[in-house]
Amino acid sequence: MTGTMSDNTIAAVVKPLYSRTAQKTPFWNEPLETMPRRELDAMHLRRLKGLIHYAYHNIPMYREIYDKAGVKPEDIQTLDDYAKKLPSIEKSDVLFYQKQGKSTVPGSEEHTTVLFQTSGTSGNVLLEPGYYPDTVNGFTCQAWAHGIRPSDRFYFAFGFGTFMAFWSYYQDVLLMGGQIITGGGVDTKTRILQIQQFRPTILVATPTYALRLAEVAKEMGVDPRASSVRIVSTAGEPGSIVPAIRRAIEGAWDAKAIDLYGISELWGSPSWECPNHQDRMHLSESSAYGIVMDEMGGLVPDGGKGEFVLTSYESTVQPLIKYRTHDIVEWHKAPCDCGRTWLSLRGGVLARTDQMVTLKGTNVYPTSVQVLLGEVQGLSERVEIHINGGDGVPVTVEVKVEPREGVSQAEFPALRAQAEKHLHDMIGVTIPVEVVQFQSLPRYELKAKVVFDHRPKRSS
Amino acid sequence: MNAKDLQEITQDLATIRGIARKLRARSGIPVVEACARWCDMYSHVALWSLGAEDSFRFMDTAVLGEEK
């Protein structure tokens, strides 16, 4: 015997979770991420036909909707048929049929292994029943593309409540093999201490909360820029795809910010920030098929803007086919120089159709107002947009915005003038802007409330 | 990655899935059936991710043929 027991322990070999080839590739799923468009579309057509057939014969909601429209699964033979003939659905349809127990596969109860729900801020809670693997691969493609590997440590600054949100990310990190540190059930100050203690490399949070954490850290005398965090990975609301929010997050944490756009009822079906272009997102076409439609339901040409309409392949218990997201995107089908052939969305979600207001004949989207204000030097990403009027009274929009830290009150009038001019130059209408004191707007723990629509609600 | 390698990978995954499904259907031992179910599910996810499997039958993971 030549060595001691401790020598033997030291000599133990820890095998890596992934081969060298897998570690080095920037693709989580190279065959599909780089698949030529023609092959991708052929796969989508096969999957859509199978899914529509399955839904029609197993889910009462689809049987009723398609029968009412006079469409049978056999009528959908091409992607053009899918775009033009198949009725789209939206959240209100799912809510309507869900209340009658018609939105899921009868007999699927034993296979509904997870149940999430939307926040229900509009008064209607949408249930999201699913099966274990439905959430898998929502975040993995993005993580791998941005150089995140199993050696990373993930801090989830998230409450793990009834929203799906980062539960899906959690499942993906388990699949990928990274180390998970759960930040559920503790307050913000404790989370700061945990970040100091456990030294995570990836911070997972909504953009609003990532900024809130940094703010509280500074109040505690802790410098977030000196932390172990190298990437702030956000979702849940527009994040680093909005330049002002990227600037704020990266400045606060001295870390790279990456953004993901997903819709929980579609079980992810995410679009995520391209590793080569900060202003574009790629749709994970392994889990969803996306098209862009105009206000009349027509297909928007490649490169155009319109409403993103998605079919998820991953919401298996309650499939959503040709689901209207109400998110306005600009889509591009050309392959990206990052090597991916998946759809590109320039600028991420540009606006919400249901938040559009018309001022003096001009369509104004609150999201655009927030983006434009972020372009004014001296203003921060913290904004409130108030919509008033309606019911015969002309609609008006007013904006409150915080300055960046260190801006003096003497500069407020000039900032206000610059902001109003910039909005007028870019949108074509006058929108009053009030520059309010730094840190005077409310702070939020999950998502920021940006749009306040004070118009009388109409009952439908 | 060439087409031949990819084909071999999908064949291996299909074999794993087939064995897992057989175990689920025949073992009669809950712990084996539970673990085999995960194996079945994730080999299906891998096949699906590669574009090699288009079935949209989540119940497929439950339909095991004749009741024991």
Image (cartoon, rainbow, N blue to C red):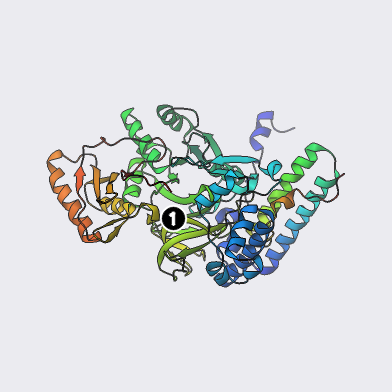
Vertical placement of residue A124 versus A369, above or below: above
Asked whether the viewer can see residue A444, the reply is yes
Q: Residue at x 33, y 41 (%)?
A: A252
Residue A115 coordinates in the image, percent (x, y):
60, 40
Residue found farthest to the right: B68
* The image quarter in which residue A127 lies: top right
Q: Nearer the viewer, residue A352 or A213?
A: A352
Residue A82 coordinates in the image, percent (x, y):
57, 67
Q: Is residue A442 left or right of residue A79?
A: left
For label 1, the crowd category at 10 Å Cα-Cα, with few meaning under 14, some 14 to 19 and many 20 or more, is: some
Residue that label 1 marks: A326
Quadrant assignment for the N terminus of chain A = top right
Asked whether the viewer can see residue A151, the reply is no
Residue A314 coordinates in the image, percent (x, y):
60, 52
Q: Nearer the viewer, residue A107 or A308?
A: A107
Q: Residue at x 37, y 57 (%)?
A: A350
* The image quarter in which residue A226 lies: top left
Q: Nearer the viewer, residue A357 or A65?
A: A65
Query: Looking at the image, how many numbered discs can be counted on the residues?
Result: 1
Numbered disc 1: what chain? A
Residue A391 coordinates in the image, percent (x, y):
29, 49
Q: Which structural element holds mark 1?
A: strand
Q: Is residue A332 left or right of residue B68?
A: left
Q: Nearer the viewer, residue A161 or A392?
A: A392
Q: Residue at x 41, y 69 (%)?
A: A303
Residue type indicated by callout 1: His
